[in-house]
Image (cartoon, helix red, strand yellow):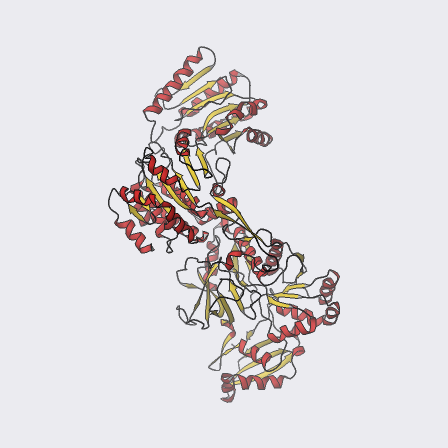
Amino acid sequence: MTVTETKAAYEQHGDGAAHHYWQGAFIGDEEAGRRLAGLPAAVEAALAEGLETETVLAACDALAGALCDPDHPVHARLAPHLPEGEDPAVLAELGGLLGRRELTRKLRRELGGAAPGRLNRADPRETVYEAWAPVGLVAHIAPGNASTVAPLSIVEGLLSGNVNVLKTSSADTLLTQHLMAELAALDPSGALAARIVVLRFPSSRQEWLRLMCAPADAVAVWGGEGAVEGVAAHVPAGCRLVEWGHRISFAYLTGDAWSDAGTLDALADDVCLHEQQACSSPQVVYLDTEDEGEVFAFAERFAAVLATRPPAVAAAPAGGPDPAEEAELTTTELVARLEEHLGLTRVFAAPDGSWRVMADTRSPLTASPLHRSVWVKPLPRKRLITTLRPMRRYLQTAGLAGSRTDIAALSRTVLAAGVTRVTPVGAMLDSYAGEPHDGVYALQRYSRRVAVQADPARFATTACLDDLARPVVLPRPAGPLLGKEDVQELAPQVARADAELYFRSGGSTGAPALSIFSYDDYDTQMHAAARGLLAAGYDPVGDRTANLFYCGAMYGSFISFFSVLERLGGVQLPLSAGPDHRATAQSLIDLGADTLFGMPSYLWQLLQAEGAALRAYGGLRKVFYGGEHFTEEQQRTLKETFGIETVRSITYGSTDLGPLGYQCTESSGGVHHLHADLHTMEVVDLAEDRPVAPGETGRLVFATHARRGQHLGRYVIGDLGREIPGRCPCGRHAPRFELRGRTGDVMRVATYFLNHRRFLDLAGEQGGHRGELQIRLDGADARELLTVRVERAGTTDPERLREVFLAGYPELRSAVTERLLDLVVEAVDGASLDRSPTSGKLLAVVDARR
C-alpha cells in the first residue's frame, strides 16, 4: 500500500467498528477474522521485502517531532484517543522516547550498532559475517494499564526487523492503532505498514488469540502470572515466550541514610509517582537493622512525610483503585492492625485512606496493595541474599541509599539476590535509552544472531555480504540545497549532547570550516570507511601500514585513519606527514612498512626526495591515497619505478560529511561506490536544482542519514561528478559515480570557463608530465595572465607543454589568439608550489586577481 493509500485509509475509516489496524488499513471484526486466518502468508510476504533500520529511525524521528509539538496536526488527531483522564503530555513523553538519538542509542546498546541487520564481518581479519536477524513474527499481548507500552513494544519489534501483530484489550482506546497509522504514513516505502497489525479484542476470544500466536516466532506478554498462563497455552513449541510480567521493587536504606530528611523526601517521590503502578515503584522499604524500635520510629517519620504530599490525581495510569483493589487495601490494612496486638506490626495511615505505612518486624518480602501503601521492614545486610533470593523471579528494582562504599557493596549483594536493576532512592522510576528491561535487552529477545562463513580467497575484499545481495534503499532527502556557508551557520545550533568531536577542514578551497560529530556518528563513519578500505584491497592481516596523513590543527585525516586501522585490527605505524623525509623513509625501512596511507602531494614529495633509499628497500607494495588524485602518469611512475602493485583511493569524503565513497578492486581513477548505507546522492545541474540527464556531469549533492549530530540536509559538497550506470563487475549493488573535479577548479578566465582537470589530463596524456601541476591567475592592465606551474622533476620541456595545452584546449587557444589571455608555463621545484598549511593539499588553482 502506498503512503497516499495508507493516509486515505487512515483518514476515511470513520466506521466505529473498524477498530483494527491491519497493514495500512482500518478494518472491522469480520475482515480481521478473515485476515487472521491468512496471517502466515501475510507474514511471509512482508519478510520477503527488506527493511532498512534507517527507514524505522527516520519515521520514528518524524513522529517524535510531531508528538512533541502540541500544535502539530498529528498531535491533534491523536489526543482524542487518549484514555479518559490521561494528560495529553503523555504524547510528548512518548515522542521523547521515539527520537533518533534515543532509538540509535538503544540499538547500539542492545544490538551493537545502528544497522545491526547488515551482514558485516565480525572480525575484519576473517571472512565470517554476522548480523542480528529478526525472529520473524512477534505477537505482542499489551497490558491494559499503560497506554504507551503497546506502541513502544511494536517499535521494538520494528527496530529488530520483525512483522508485528499486537493485541490490545477490548476496553482500550484506539490510541495504538492511530499511532501506528501515523507512523506508517511517514514511511513512503510502505515497509512499516506491511509489518504492523494491531487488533482490539477481549481475552475471552480464544480463537483469535490462537490464530495470532500460532505462526509467531516470539510472543511478548505484558501482565501478571494469570495473563502469561492464559497466553502460554497458545504458544507453539519452539516459539519464544517473552514475559514482561509484574515485578516487585524495594528500597534499602542504611542507618546514615534513613536519618536524613532528604532521603525520606526522595523515597516519597518514588512512592507517589504513578501511585506505585509501575513495576519499579517501591513496595517495601528495608532498613539495615535488626532493631524493631528503629523500624517503628522510621515508619512514623515516613508517614509524616507522606501526609504532606498532594493527593493522587486521576491522571494515574489506572485512575483510582477499583472495587477489587479497594477491598485488598482494606483487608491488608485491617490484618496489619490486628497484628499490632501481637507486637508484630504498627500501622500509620491517612484518615481518608489515601496512604498507609505498615511497619512489620518480619523481613520476608511482602507485596504491597499499592496506591501509596508501603511496608517497612528490618533486614540486616548479612541476611539480604537469604531473605530475597526465594523471590528472585519477581524482583526488579532496588533503590539504595547509603555511603559510596555501601552503595558499591550493596549493589553487588542485591544483584546476587536476583535484582536486575539498582538506582538511587528518588530515581527508582527513572530510565535511560537502551536500558535493559527485567534483566534482558528486548531487541535481543526479538532477534537471532546469525552467521555466514565464506571462502577467504573469494571474499577477501567483501566487507559486507549484503552489498552483493541487494541495494540499500534509504528515504529520499527533501529541502533546499545547502552549501558550506549554510552549514557553517547551522553549526552553532548542534545540540550540546551531540557536540562531542570537532574537526576543521584543510582549507584548500577556502577558509577552514568547522564540523561537529557525536562519538556515535564518528564510530559509524569509521566502520564504514574500514569496510570501504577492505573493498579497495587492504589486507588487515598481511599489510604493515604507515599512516602518513597530516596531523594537528583539528584536521581529521590522520586521526580518522588511525581509527579506521584500529577497527580493522591492522598493523599501523602512526608516523604522520613530516618535513624530514629522510627520517620518515628510514622508519619505513626499519619497521618493514609495505603500505602507505597519505595525501598524493606528500607521498609524491617523499618518494621523489628519498627515491634511491626506497627503491633499494624494495618493500613498498600498496599506496592508498586521499584528499587529492594521482594522475595516470604518476601512478605509472609509482608502479614502474618503485615496484608498487596497488595504487588506489583510500576513500572519497569530506571533513563535514565523512566517508562518502570507496573504491573496489574494479575501480580506478575517480570512480567510487557510494556508501549507500550512510548517504543518498544526487547529481544536479550546475546552475539549477534539477537532476542532470543520466551519465551527464553535474554538482554532487549528498544527504547523510545515519547521523544524529550535525544535520547537513542536501549538501552541495563542491565536487563535480557523474553517475555510472549499471552494476559494477565486482558484484556490489552500491551506486557508482565518477569524480570530475571541483566546482572551484572551473575558472572564469577571459570570458571563457577553463577547467584545471583538463590541463592536468593534457599534461599527462599528451605531454608526458608525471609531476604536480598548479594554475595561478593574475590580473593585468591589458589582459589576464594564466600561469601553469609544473613540477620540474616531472617535466621534460615547459614550452612543449604550452604547445600541448594550446593544441588540445580550443577555448584556451581562442582566448590566447584573441589576445584576451597570456599563457605561461613554468617549471618549479615541488616545494615552491602553494599548499594548504593544514592538510598539505596542493592548491589546484591560486586566484591572485583583484
> Does residue 260 lie above or below 771 as drawn?
above
Position of residue 66 measured from the top left corner of the image (x, y, whole percent): 36, 49
Residue at image point 59% right, 56% down = 455
Farthest top residue in view: 341
Residue 227 appears in which quarter of the rendering? top left
Residue 571 appears in which quarter of the rendering? bottom right
In the image, 477 versus 253, the foreground residue is 477
Does 651 sit left or right of 36 as displayed? right
Q: Is residue 298 visible to us here?
A: yes
Task: Quarter of the image for the N terminus: give it.
Answer: bottom left
Q: Is residue 656 visible to us here?
A: no
In the image, 479 versus 218, the foreground residue is 218
In the image, 242 versus 764, the foreground residue is 242
Number of marks in the image? 0
Residue at image point 60% right, 74% down = 632
> Does residue 745 lie above or below 151 as drawn?
below
Position of residue 756 measured from the top left corner of the image (x, y, whole percent): 54, 76
Farthest left residue in view: 15
Position of residue 459 measured from the top left corner of the image (x, y, whole percent): 58, 59
Position of residue 233 measured from the top left corner of the image (x, y, whole percent): 40, 33
